[in-house]
C-alpha cells in the first residue's frame, strides 16, 4: 500500500502514465500528474477524480529546467515530500539516420532523455529530504534491441537505460531505488501512428499477441 506517499508522474495524460497514476491513487498515494498538453492533462485528472481518487494536475515542459524546477517546487509546497517519481513523458518520431531531421533528433532527445534527466535531477533532493524514495524511468525494448526506422527514439531510450543504471549506483546508499521499465509494443494512442506505418491491422494483431510482427518483441 502507498498510504501517505506522494507520487509524481510525468507524461501524465498518456495511457500508461494515467493507468499508473490510477493504480498509485487506488493504493492510497497522493498523486501529481504533469504533462505539456494542458487540455489532455485536465481531462486525465478529471477522469481520476471522477473515481474519487486524490489527483492534482500540474502543467510542465520537461525540456525546460525552469519548468521542471517549478513542478518540483509545487510538489514540495503542496505535499512537503516526494516518494515516487515516474518519468513517462516521451515522443516517438519515425525515421532512419538519413531520414531523421536534426530538429526531430534534438526534440526526441530533449523530451525523452534530457526530460528524464531534469526530472530526476530536481526530484532527488526532495526525496533525500524525506529519507529516500523510488524512481521509475520509462524506457522501451527499443532501448535494448534496435527497431527499424527509429534512430532518434532508440538512441534516446538506450540513453535512459544507462542513465537509470548509473543513477541506481549513485543513489542506492541514499535510500533511493531506481528502476527502468522497458515495455514492448502496447496498443495506445502514442503508438498508433507507428503501428499503422509498420503494418496496420497485422501489426496491431501482433501487439495483442504480445510479440512483434516478425515474432520478436516490439517497442512503444
Image (cartoon, rainbow, N blue to C red):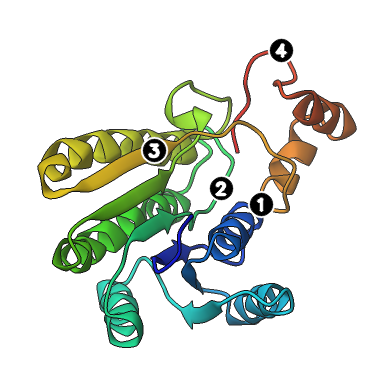
Q: Read off the residue under disc 4.
A: 215
Q: Image quadrant for the C terminus?
A: top right
Of tags 3 and 2, the one toward the viewer is 3
Looking at the image, residue 213 sits to the left or right of residue 147; the answer is: right
- Residue 201 left/right relative to 212: right
| Residue 164 percent across, percent down from the top left | 28, 40
> Residue at 59% of width from left, 41% of height from top?
94
User: Circles 4 and 1: CB distance less than 8 Å?
Assistant: no
Mark 4 to mark 1 CA distance (whole Å) = 22 Å
Look at the numbered discs 1 and 2 and tell me whether their residues touch, using CB distance below 8 Å: yes
Q: Residues under labels 3 and 2: Cα distance?
A: 18 Å
Q: Is residue 208 above or below residue 15?
A: above
Q: Are marks 3 and 2 in contact (CB under 8 Å)?
A: no
Circle 3 sits on which residue?
180
Which numbered mark, 1 or 3, is in the foreground of this view?
3
Real-space Cα separation, disc 1 to disc 2, in angstroms:
8 Å
Amino acid at each position: 500500500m502507498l498510504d501517505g506517499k506522494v507520487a509524481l508522474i510525468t507524461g501524465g495524460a498518456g495511457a500508461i502514465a494515467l493507468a499508473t497514476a490510477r493504480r498509485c491513487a487506488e493504493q492510497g498515494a497522493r498523486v501529481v500528474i504533469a504533462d505539456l498538453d494542458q487540455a489532455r492533462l485536465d481531462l486525465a485528472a478529471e477522469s481520476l477524480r471522477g473515481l474519487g481518487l486524490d489527483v492534482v494536475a500540474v502543467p510542465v515542459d520537461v525540456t525546460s529546467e525552469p519548468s521542471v524546477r517549478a513542478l518540483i517546487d509545487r510538489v514540495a509546497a503542496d505535499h512537503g515530500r516526494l516518494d515516487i517519481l515516474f518519468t513517462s513523458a516521451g515522443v516517438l518520431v519515425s525515421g532512419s539516420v538519413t531520414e531523421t531531421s536534426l530538429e526531430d533528433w534534438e526534440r526526441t532527445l530533449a523530451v525523452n532523455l534530457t526530460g528524464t534527466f531534469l526530472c530526476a535531477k530536481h526530484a532527488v533532493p526532495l526525496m533525500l529530504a524525506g529519507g529516500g524514495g523510488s524512481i521509475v524511468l520509462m524506457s522501451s525494448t527499443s532501448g535494448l534491441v534496435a527497431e527499424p526506422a527509429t534512430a532518434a527514439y532508440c538512441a534516446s531510450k538506450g540513453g535512459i537505460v544507462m542513465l537509470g543504471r548509473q543513477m541506481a549506483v549513485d543513489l542506492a546508499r541514499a535510500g533511493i531505488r531506481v528502476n527502468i521499465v522497458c515495455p514492448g509494443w502496447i496498443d495506445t494512442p502514442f503508438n498508433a501512428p507507428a503501428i499503422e506505418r509498420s503494418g496496420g491491422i497485422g501489426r496491431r494483431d501482433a501487439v495483442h499477441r504480445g510479440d512483434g510482427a516478425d515474432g520478436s518483441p516490439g517497442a512503444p
